[in-house]
Amino acid sequence: MEKEYPNDVYKECLRNHAASLGSYATDGCGEFTLDDTSLATLQCAACGCHRNFHRKVSYCSSSSRSRGELENTVERIDYGDEGGSRGRRPTVGECGKKRFRTKFTAEQKGKMLEFAGKLGWKLQRREEEDEVEKFCRGIGVSRQVFKVWMHNHKNSSAASSVSTCNLSSLTTP
């Protein structure tokens, strides 16, 4: 069962009533209104659709406010379960902020590519810990950032090295 949050509002109905015809048509319901006769089923009194068909808007605020004081809040549109965040609500610090994305220089990328190849694209737990830490300090990234970069690039680097090997074996007599 879905948890109820006081700052959630269900707006217009998005149900496609013409899907069976291969078209798109909504019923024009502007906002979800709970049908008093069917509290357990969460049906809209205006259109008869379930609440899940209505666009969900979550309001995040820096302090707890009543619904009438939402003018200074950030609107967060919830489009469903993206990224495996089922049941998880944004905290006050997360709301409306984007995740920081690490940018690498060409020099850093080259050094990480070379070092990852030397390691065999796997970080050992404790054996080469000092060497990995020294390398990361040398290029200015944390061990965790390097680990994630290696995980994200191990398949693409292996594929490119295999294709270059195949090309070189075809061109030599």
Image (cartoon, rainbow, N blue to C red):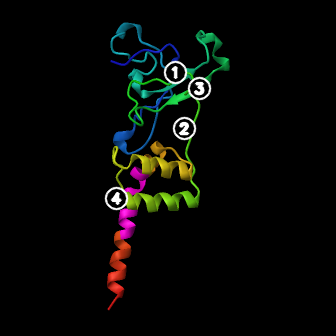
Element type where label 3 sits in the image:
strand
How far, Cα to Cα, is label 2 from label 4?
30 Å
Give the structural element (helix, strand or loop) at label 4: loop
Within 10 angstroms of label 1, few (less than 14), some, or many (20 or more) residues? some
Taking depth in this image into account, of 106 and 135 the one nearest to the observer is 135
Q: Which mark is residue 75?
A: 3
Nearer the observer, disc 2 or disc 1?
2
Say which label, 2 or 1, has the lower sequence index: 1
Q: Position of residue 55 (x, y in %)?
A: 48, 28
**Local crowd at mark 2 within 10 Å, few (<14), some, or many (≥20)?**
few
Name the secondary structure under disc 1: loop
The kind of residue on which mark 4 rests is Gly
Residue type at the position of mark 1: Glu
- Please name the residue that numbered disc 1 is placed on: 31
Q: Compared with residue 84, is residue 135 higher up or lower down, i.e. above or below? A: below
Q: Which mark is residue 120?
A: 4
Earlier-in-chain disc, 3 versus 1: 1
Q: Residue at x 61, y 13 (%)?
A: 63
Q: Is residue 35 above or below residue 30?
A: above
Mark toward the start of the polypeptide (1 vs 4): 1
Mark 3 or mark 2, earlier in chain: 3
Discs 1/4, front: 4
In which quadrant of the rendered view does residue 116 lie? bottom left
Q: Are marks 1 and 4 in contact (CB under 8 Å)?
A: no
Mark 3 residue type? Glu
- Marks 1/4: CA distance? 56 Å
Which region is colored magenta? 150-161
Q: Which residue is mark 2?
A: 99
Indicate which disc, 2 or 4, sits on the residue closer to the N terminus.
2
Q: State yes or no: discs 3 and 2 in contact (Cβ < 8 Å).
A: no
Q: Residues within 10 Å of mark 3 (few under 14, many from 20)?
A: some
Instruction: Please tell me which residue lies in front, 125 or 121.
Output: 125
